Image (tube, rainbow, N blue to C red):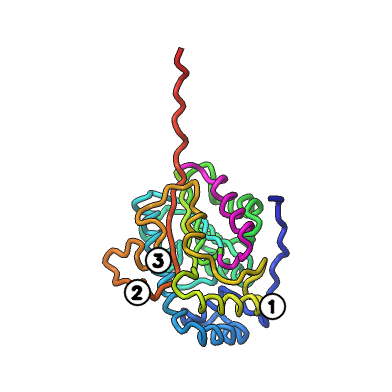
């Protein structure tokens, strides 16, 4: 696929924004009237959306703890980070590994400015403005390369991002480019709402978000299925228990939200080490 140059996002508070809608669902105050109206409209279709948002944060917390702890990762790139909330990636990672470095990436100018103001004194955490739809530019952004060494293992985080890219070819291009660019031993973690459990409801939501302009860059009749999301992990070794509904991903001592009512899946995959080269037999 040819290199993409998506138009730089502009701050327009009259257009609903996905991260500000999520902030509203989580009880935050960093949202505007258009975001609240869009959120309330979505709630008439799926009243469980705030619960799904909270469950998404719980999955993020468990995944990052695994990556910083058991997996030993010390570099994180959180793409589509959204507005700062409690329990951010750097807070979770630093609670396990204080030397971890984190780059937050978002294409929304307000999100970036807000994050930069909050983290200006944090030397190990930065916020940059870049677009996931142009992964090559994202990974070569000087703000990222000044903190992250892509020749060493890194965790790429795509939590609740790829459903905002309805074009399957583009979504695959994003993940494939990221997978090829990261070093062996790196990880990809993502979450994605799916249509399997409630196809009529998710189709209505997809239509609403696309009509409002909240989701751009293509159209589709419904969210991806779980099987379609699993393909994003092609070429990676899935960490147990694989791609599952998020309450079932290593819940530990947490009391999981009802998995039969959670239509968001998540998983973590590891890029294999290069196979050892054996000397030719003579």
| N-term mark: 2 or 3 | 3
- Write the start and end of the magenta stretch as one range: 163-184
Q: Are marks 2 and 1 in contact (CB under 8 Å)?
A: no
Front label number (2 vs 1): 2
Q: Secondary structure at mark 1?
A: loop
Work out how far the residue at label 2 is from the one at label 1, CA to CA, in angstroms. 35 Å
Asked whether 135 or 126 is in front, the reply is: 135
Residue reaching furthest to the top: 282
| Numbered mark located on residue 40 in the image | none
Work out how far the residue at label 1 is from the one at label 3, CA to CA, in angstroms. 34 Å
Front label number (2 vs 3): 3
- Left or right? Give the position of 11 relative to 38: right
Q: Residue at x 57, y 61 (%)?
A: 105
Query: Residue 167's x, y, as percent?
Result: 63, 62
Query: Residue 23's x, y, as percent?
Result: 51, 77
Asked whether 20 or 166 is in front, the reply is: 166
| Numbered mark located on residue 245 in the image | 3
Q: Residue at x 38, y 52 (%)?
A: 239
Instruction: Please give the residue where the numbered disc 2 appears in the rendered image.
Output: 257
Q: Secondary structure at mark 2?
A: loop
Q: Residue at x 53, y 49 (%)?
A: 148
Front label number (1 vs 3): 3
Above/below status of 6 relative to 235: below
Residue 107: quadrant of the picture? bottom right
Instruction: Please give the residue where the numbered disc 1 appears in the rendered image.
Output: 12
Q: Residues within 10 Å of mark 2 (few under 14, many from 20)?
A: some
Asked whether 196 falls inside the magenta stretch, the response is no
| N-term mark: 1 or 3 | 1
SS majority, magenta: helix
Work out how far the residue at label 2 is from the one at label 3, CA to CA, in angstroms. 10 Å
Residue 51: quadrant of the picture? bottom left
């Amino acid at each position: 696929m040819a290199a993409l140059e998506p138009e730089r996002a502009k701050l327009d508070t009259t257009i609903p924004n996905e991260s500000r809608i999520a902030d509203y669902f989580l009880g935050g105050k960093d949202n505007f009237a258009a975001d609240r109206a869009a959120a309330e409209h979505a709630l008439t279709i799926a009243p469980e959306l705030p619960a799904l948002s909270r469950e998404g944060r719980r999955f993020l917390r468990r995944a990052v703890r695994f990556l910083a702890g058991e997996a030993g990762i010390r570099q994180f790139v959180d793409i589509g980070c959204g507005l700062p909330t409690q329990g951010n990636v750097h807070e979770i990672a630093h609670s396990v590994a204080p030397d971890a470095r984190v780059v937050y990436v978002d294409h929304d100018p307000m999100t970036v400015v807000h994050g930069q103001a909050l983290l200006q004194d944090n030397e190990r955490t930065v916020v940059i403005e870049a677009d996931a739809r142009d992964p090559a530019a994202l990974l070569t952004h000087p703000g990222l390369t000044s903190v992250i060494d892509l020749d060493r293992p890194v965790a790429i985080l795509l939590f609740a991002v790829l459903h905002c890219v309805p074009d399957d070819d583009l979504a695959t291009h994003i993940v494939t480019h990221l997978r090829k660019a990261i070093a062996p031993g790196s990880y990809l973690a993502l979450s994605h709402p799916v249509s399997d459990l409630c196809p009529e409801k998710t189709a209505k939501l997809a239509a609403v978000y696309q009509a409002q302009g909240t989701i751009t860059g293509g159209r589709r009749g419904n969210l991806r299925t779980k099987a379609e999301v699993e393909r994003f992990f092609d070429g990676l070794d899935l960490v147990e228990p694989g791609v599952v509904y998020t309450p079932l991903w290593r819940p530990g001592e947490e009391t999981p939200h009802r998995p039969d009512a959670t239509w968001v899946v998540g998983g973590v995959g590891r890029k294999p080490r290069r196979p050892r080269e054996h000397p030719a037999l003579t």
